[in-house]
Image (cartoon, rainbow, N blue to C red):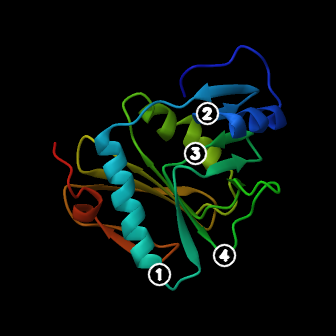
Amino acid sequence: MSTAASTFLTPEEYLERERAAETKSEYYGGEMFAMAGVSVQHVTIVINVAGELRSSLKGKPCAVYPADLRLAIGATGLYTYPDVMVICGKPAVIDAHVDTVTNPVVIIEVLSPSTEGYDRGRKFESYRAIPSLMEYLTVSQHSVHVEIHTRQPDNTWLLRDIRDSGAVKLQSIGVELQLADIYERIEF
């Protein structure tokens, strides 16, 4: 998160402002936070991941949604835009605008220097409150490194650290992503 607003906003006031805005902002605790810009590497990784997922999920009941779809987390009050989400079945939306969902099965964030701590910390803490969420990936844009957190039957989370080569296995949706495909056209 970056620049904070100076007055308290209700979620409804946030959504009204956000829907009229030209830029995206997150919302938490009554404040709007302007989202930071992204790099070419960041966008390339998002496109690579979304493309591989879309191809792998053809004919299955799951769909891929890149960064423009808003996520609302009722338990924590966070409204955010994950880099990539996978939703299986019908998207659960919060209102007739059909622009804010609540039921991702997989969330993927490409780490940026300014948001890495937040993505791994408080944001992941909020994500864990989503009942449908089964897997959370963080993808480095500065080295070949993916962390995958998988919800266990006892509601704990297992971390798998994948570096250099190999594949990322998304058990919840039956998809395997090769690191070479995630990092295609990325130079370090």
Callouts 3 and 2 close, C-beta under 8 Å = no
The amino acid sitting under disc 2 is: Ser
Front one among 40 and 60: 40
Residue 34 visible (yes or no): yes
Q: As drawn, is 133 to the left or to the right of 6?
A: left
Residue wearing tag 1: 58
Q: Residues within 10 Å of mark 3 (few under 14, many from 20)?
A: many
Q: Quadrant of the C terminus?
A: top left
Location of mark 3 (residue): 81
x and y percentages locating residue 17 in the rendered image: 74, 32
Element type where label 3 sits in the image? loop
Classify 10 Å Cα crowding around label 4: few (below 14), some (14-19), many (20 and above). Answer: few
> Quadrant of residue 16 in the image?
top right
Whole-Å distance between the Cαs marked 3 and 2? 8 Å
Q: Which residue is mark 2?
A: 25
Q: Earlier in the sequence, mark 3 or mark 4?
A: 3
The residue sitting at 63% across, 35% down in the picture is 26
Calculate the distance from the C-alpha at mark 2 to the C-alpha at mark 4. 27 Å
Is there any visible trace of residue 128 in the rendered image? no
Q: Which mark is residue 89?
A: 4
Which badge, 1 or 2, comes first in the chain's sequence? 2
